[in-house]
Amino acid sequence: MASATAAFLSTLAASSSLTTSPTPTPASRFSIPTASQRRPRRRGVAWAAPSGTDTEKPPSPSPKKKKSSDERVVKVHSAEEFDAALLAAKNRLVVVEFAASHSVNSSRIYPTMVELSRTCGDVDFLLVMGDESDATRSLCAREGIESVPHFSFYKSSEKIHEEEGIGPDQLAGDVLYYGDHHSAVVQLHSRDDVERLLADHRGDGEDGKGKLVVLDVGLKRCGPCVKVYPTVVKLSRSMAETTVFARMNGDENDSCMEFLRDMDVVEVPTFLFIRDGEIVGRYVGSGRGELVGEILRYNGVRVTY
């Protein structure tokens, strides 16, 4: 086991996939240009100079390509269409980009939305152009949108998270964190879920000991929790033979919050390391290297910091 995990550590050290995301571009103030300020729009490209900051020339559009049949970003034109889309999604994650035709940053981030819509089949994606009409202006005002691009995340018609001025990596990380259902990370929603998971992994290791269970405890609206979660997903795939990864959001319900109190979790993210039903250690923080080091240490690999 130690040699396998040591090999994984060397692979991880050589990889650039877990590096920190670049600094996101700032959001543009949300303002609607007058008729004399508006530029003609090309099909499929939303751009023009925003008020104050986005003054550079928008990027030239790519050569025309046949529209992909799996492009699932739905453009909504009114509050009625918006509310209907949230209602139809039920408990699926809905990601909404509020954009404007005068925002270069909106135009730049939109291809990421399209790509995510093709790869995340269980997530719905909506686009609201705030300067399209009085109806979309009213919708933006109702949702409290002041800068674009602005991303809001909804489940069961309830807003659970929002960001503005973010880059592609952070957007992808947010979608993964709030919409993850298919990775190797076990999603836990109650104390009973935790107890079942621990019971399933008592004595299931090659040496007769249970596999190490890494329980990622966070909150729904927690920036550091979102930041580190892509690392958790990658590790869950790479270390599946030796380690079980699970996640719980403490503010999901009363049972989860009670579990956090019983485990003396006072900061998030907190990672609990559990073997055969016993907590053998914990790590508090979102440092990728430190987390990997702690997991290897509790799997019996000597780690020098």
Image (spheres, rainbow, N blue to C red):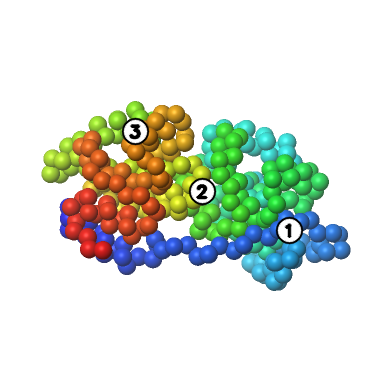
Residue under label 2: 175
- Three-letter amino acid code at the position of disc 2: Val
For the residues labelled 2 and 1, the Cα–Cα distance comes to 24 Å
In this rendering, the label closer to the viewer, 3 or 2: 3
Query: 164 or 133: nearer the eye?
Result: 164
Q: In what element is the residue under mark 1? A: loop
- Three-letter amino acid code at the position of disc 1: Ser
Contact flag, marks 3 and 2 (Cβ < 8 Å): no
Q: Quadrant of residue 63?
A: bottom right
Q: In what element is the residue under mark 3? A: helix
Q: Counting residues from the N terminus, which is met first, the one under dot 1 or under dot 3? A: 1
In this rendering, the label closer to the viewer, 1 or 3: 3
**Residue 207: x %, y % from top left:** 12, 44
Q: Residue at x 81, y 46 (%)?
A: 134
Q: Quadrant of residue 155?
A: top right
Q: In what element is the residue under mark 2? A: helix
Residue under label 3: 262
- Three-letter amino acid code at the position of disc 3: Asp
- Name the disc covering residue 101, or none: 1
For the residues labelled 3 and 2, the Cα–Cα distance comes to 30 Å
Q: Residue at x 68, y 64 (%)?
A: 104
**Residue 13: x %, y % from top left:** 31, 65
